[in-house]
């Protein structure tokens, strides 16, 4: 995922949390906000310190970035998306995280079928 396609600023995160909608499953929570003027979706990742040490948290973020890279063509382009990992995500491998992300995106109708 290109760095230009990431949410980084606190104000951007706050706006999505405040005005966006959310959907969750056991492993992931997503917040999303429509941005009709955008050319590409943007993603922000959040993994709490409660989940594990830095190695575990960075591994989860790497897996999520790779999953978005593989789902790039299917994700709706006019959205800001925040993904929050929950505790069960620390024991998952890449394929399980991708499957969970696909599930939560399709339930929130952000994934083209």
Image (cartoon, rainbow, N blue to C red):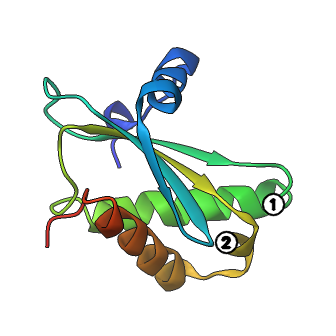
Residue name at image x 39 percent, y 74 percent:
103
Position of 52 with respect to 14 (left or right) is right
Q: How many marks?
A: 2
Task: Find disc 2 in the rendering and name its residue.
Answer: 89
User: Quadrant where the C terminus lies?
Assistant: bottom left
Q: Quadrant of residue 67?
A: bottom left
Residue name at image x 26 percent, y 41 percent:
41
Asked if marks 2 and 1 touch (Cβ < 8 Å), the reply is: yes
Give the crowd class for mark 1: few <14, some 14-19, many >=20 residues within 10 Å: some
Residue name at image x 59 percent, y 82 percent:
93
The image shows residue 42, relative to residue 1, as above or below, that is above
Residue 62, position as x, y percentages in the image? 54, 60
The image shows residue 96, relative to residue 31, as above or below, that is below
Position of 27 with respect to 35 (left or right) is right
Q: Which mark is residue 51?
A: 1
Q: Secondary structure at mark 2?
A: helix
Q: Secondary structure at mark 1?
A: loop
Residue 5, position as x, y percentages in the image? 33, 37
Q: Quadrant of residue 6?
A: top left
Residue name at image x 33 percent, y 31 percent:
4
Most foreground residue, 97 or 3: 97
Residue 92, position as x, y percentages in the image? 64, 81
User: Mark 2 to mark 1: distance in Å?
Assistant: 8 Å
Q: Which mark is residue 4?
A: none
The image shows residue 110, relative to residue 82, as above or below, that is below
Most foreground residue, 103 or 43: 103
Give the crowd class for mark 2: few <14, some 14-19, many >=20 residues within 10 Å: many
Residue 28, position as x, y percentages in the image? 57, 63
The earlier-in-sequence mark between 2 and 1 is: 1
């Amino acid at each position: 995922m290109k760095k230009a396609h990431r949410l980084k600023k606190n104000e951007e995160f706050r706006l999505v949390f405040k005005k966006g909608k959310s959907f969750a499953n056991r492993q992931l929570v997503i917040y999303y906000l429509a941005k009709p003027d955008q050319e590409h979706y943007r993603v922000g990742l959040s993994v709490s310190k409660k989940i594990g040490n830095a190695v575990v948290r960075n591994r989860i973020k790497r897996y999520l970035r790779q999953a978005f890279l593989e789902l790039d063509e299917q994700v709706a382009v006019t959205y800001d998306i925040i993904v929050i990992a929950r505790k069960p995500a620390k024991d998952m491998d890449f394929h399980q995280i991708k499957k969970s992300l696909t599930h939560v995106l399709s339930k929130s109708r952000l994934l083209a079928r």
